[in-house]
Image: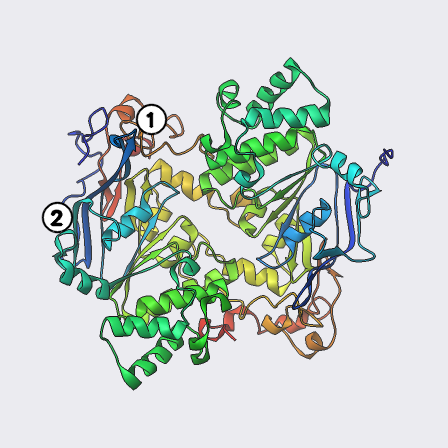
Amino acid sequence: MTAPATGPGPLLEVRALRTWFHTDAGIARAVDGIDFQVQPGEIVGLVGESGSGKSVTALSIMQLVPRPPGELMAGSSIRFRGEELVGASGARLRALRGADIAMIFQEPMTSLNPVLQVGRQIGEVLRVHRGLAGKAVWRRTVELLELVGIPEPERRSDDYPHQLSGGQRQRVMIAMARAGEPELLIADEPTTALDVTIQAQILDLIAELRARLGMAVLLITHDLGVVAGVCDRVLVMYAGQIVEQGPGADVFREPHHPYTEGLLRAIPRLGHATERLAVIPGAVPSPLAWPPTCRFHPRCPYAWEACAAHAPGLIPLDGRSGASRCWLEPHPERRAGRGYGDVRSGAELP
Amino acid sequence: MMPPAGGPVRTDLPPAGGRAVDDTTAPPDALLEVRDLRKHFPVRRGLFARTVGAVRAVDGVSFWVERGRTLGLVGESGSGKTTTGRTLLRLIEPPAGRARFAGQDIFAMDRRQLRQLRRRAQIVFQDPYGSLDPRMTVGDMLREVLQVHRLAAGRAREARVRQLLDIVGLSPRHAERYPHEFSGGQRQRIGIARALSVQPEFIVCDEPVSALDVSVQAQVLNLLRDLQRELKLSYLFIAHDLGVVEHISHDIAVMYLGRIVELGRAAQVIGTPCHPYTRALLSSVPTPDPVQARARIVLSGDMPSPAQPPSGSPFHPRCPPPRKDADCVRLVPPLAERAPGHFAACIKEPAWR
C-alpha cells in the first residue's frame, strides 16, 4: 500500500476528466473535460439535469464505470489525497472504497442485500474495513444506527431491508457508509426517491455528520433546491461540462451562466405563483453530437454570433469568486434587453 | 364500510374556529363535489384469505372542484391522493361516500353513463411511458380514441389528430412515431393530447410532471395553464411538490394519511397555513434560496401506516411540540372553517395563532 500524501491540499482533485462510451451509434462523450476539487470537510453540490453527466462523474471517481463500453480517456486524472486513482490496482481501489470513499445512491434497495439483516451488512463493513470482531462489531453497529437516527437500533439491526421505510433504508445506507469512517462521501441523488419531509431529515443528517465528523460530501442531484440548503459550493453541469461554479449562496442569488439562470427561473417557487415559469427552449442535445462551440448556445436566449463561432472556457467572474463558461462574462453589455422573459411556451419544441 | 379502528372517530366538540365542512359548504355550481369519500383496501391473510384488517387509504375526504379552476391535491406517498383521484373516474371500485360530477352521482352510474363520464372527465398519469402502447404510433393512438368515442371519421379525423398534436406543441410529423422515440416531456405532451382528444371538461392530473427534469417540467406546467385558459378546463391536480401545486392551483387541499387536513384558496393555504402539517410541508420544500432553506421545520419519524392509523388527529404522533395534548390523541378534529373558504383539521390551531 502506498502511503497517502499528507499535508494541506484538496481531498479530491479531478482534472481533465473525460469519460466516453463507445456505442453502436458512435462515441457518447458523457463527461467531457471537467475539473474540480473537494476540500476536506467541504460539501460540494454537483447539479444537472438528466444527461448532464453528473452520475457518470460519480462513477468515474469511484472507478466504477463499466469498461467497455466506458473509457476514461487519456489525460483524465482523479487524485484522492494526492494519490492517482486512474489506473490504480483493483486491490487498492477496493481498499479505498468503503473505507476512505463511500457512496450512497438514490434507491437504497438496489444497494442493500435483501436477504441479510441490515445490522449484519453494517457489521461486514466494520469487519472488512475497520478490522473489528466479536462484540465490538455489534456495539459499533448499534452505535452507528443510533447516530443516523434509527429508533430502537438494537431491535432494528435485525430487520431486513424490506421491513424499513424508504427514509430508514437511506439512513441505514448512510450508517454503512459511515462504518468505514470515510473522508469523502459521494451521495448520488440520495433524497430523490423520498418525500419532502423525509428528504429534509436526510439532508439534515448529512449536514450534521459533516459538522460532527468533518466528512467531505460530494452531493449529486438534479434539484437545485436540495443543494441550496446544505452545500458550501455548487458546480452546475450541462452536456458533459461544468458550466458554472461558485459559492452556493452566490450562485443562487446571482446566477451567471444562462443555463443556471434558466433552471432557477423554471422552478415554481412558493409565494410566486402568478409568475410564468421560464422555459429553456428545446432539449438537452445528444452526447453523440454535442454542439461544437458553446454547448448551450442553441437553447440560449442571449446567444449571438460569437457563441456559434468559439467555445468559451470557464471564465472567472469579475468581482466575486466563481466562474462561468459563457461569453457574457467578457461582454456583460450583451445581457441588456434579452433573457428568458421573452420566451413563450409555444415555441420550445424543435 | 370498515368499523373504525379504536377510539372515537367523530367528535361533537364545537369546531374550533367555525363551521365544519358539510353538505352545504361546496358552491352549488361546483363541477365536482366529493363528500366523505372512503376507500379501504382489505388486508387478507392465511389459507382462506380471511380479512384481518384494512388499509384506510382514503378515510373520509370532502372537497370540490369549481368550473374552470384547479384544485391541487397535495400530500406525501401514502397520503391517499392518488387513490382519491382514481376513485373519481371509477378506476378503483367501489368506494364509500358520494361524488357528484355535474350533478350526477359518479358511484351510481351504469355502463352507458360511465362511458359518458369518461368523455367528460379524463386522466393524465405520472409515467406517460407506462400508459402509452409501445406498439402504436402516436397518430394511431389518437385515431383509436376518436373512433371508439365516434368523435370524428375520415378526413375530419386526420385533421383532428393534427390539431391535437398542435395544441400540445408537437408537430404533425410526430404522428407517425412510436412512444420510445420521444423524450419524457414529449411523452407527457402525448398523454395530454390523448386526454384532450375527447374534449373533456375535467382532467385528473396525477403527478404529471414529477418524473420530468426541471426545465421540461416548466414547459408542461405552462402548457397545462394555457390549455385551461383556452379550453376552459377544470383540473384536479395531484402532486407531492407544493411549489408545483401552488403554481398551477386556484385552490389547494392538503392530504395526510387518508384525510384532508387543510383546504382553501391557494393564497390562504400557502400564505397563512393553519395546520401544523401544512406548515412543516411548506418549510420542507427544497427551495433554491439558501436563507429560506435553513429555516426548516424538520418532522421526526415517518408517516404512520394507513393500515394502523393513529387515534385522534392523524398527525399527532409527528406534531411538533408544544401544540399537541391529550385531546389530539383522543379526538378526530373536524375540517373546520378558519376564515371564509379556508378550512383546517386541528383543534389546537386557534390557541396558538
- Residue in the image at 57% along x and 46% along y: A189
Counting other residues with Cα less than 10 Å from the Cα at mark 1, is it few (<14), some (14-19), or many (20 or more)? some
Q: Residue A136's image quarter?
A: top right
Task: Say which amino acid is labelled 2.
Answer: Thr
Where does residue B153 sit, x and y in percent of width and height? 26, 81
Where does residue A176 sit, x and y in percent of width and height? 62, 30
| Colour pattern of the rendering | rainbow
Give the residue at the far top of this rendering: A135
List the residue tagged with mark 1: B324
Q: Nearer the viewer, residue B185 or A91?
A: A91
Q: Residue B256's image quarter?
A: top left
Q: CA distance from mark 1 to mark 2?
A: 30 Å
Give the residue at the far front of this rendering: B47
Q: Would residue A291 be found to the left or right of residue A343 on screen?
A: right
Looking at the rendered image, the quarter that the N terminus of chain B falls into is top left
Where does residue B343 sit, x and y in percent of width and height? 25, 43
Q: Is residue A250 visible?
A: no
Q: Nearer the viewer, residue B310 or A61?
A: A61
Q: Earlier in the sequence, mark 1 or mark 2?
A: 2
Callout 1: chain: B
List the residue tagged with mark 2: B24
Callout 2: chain: B
Q: Nearer the viewer, residue A36 or B296?
A: A36
Q: How many callouts does the rendering have? A: 2
- Residue in the image at 24% along x and 33% along y: B333
Task: Say which amino acid is labelled 1.
Answer: Lys
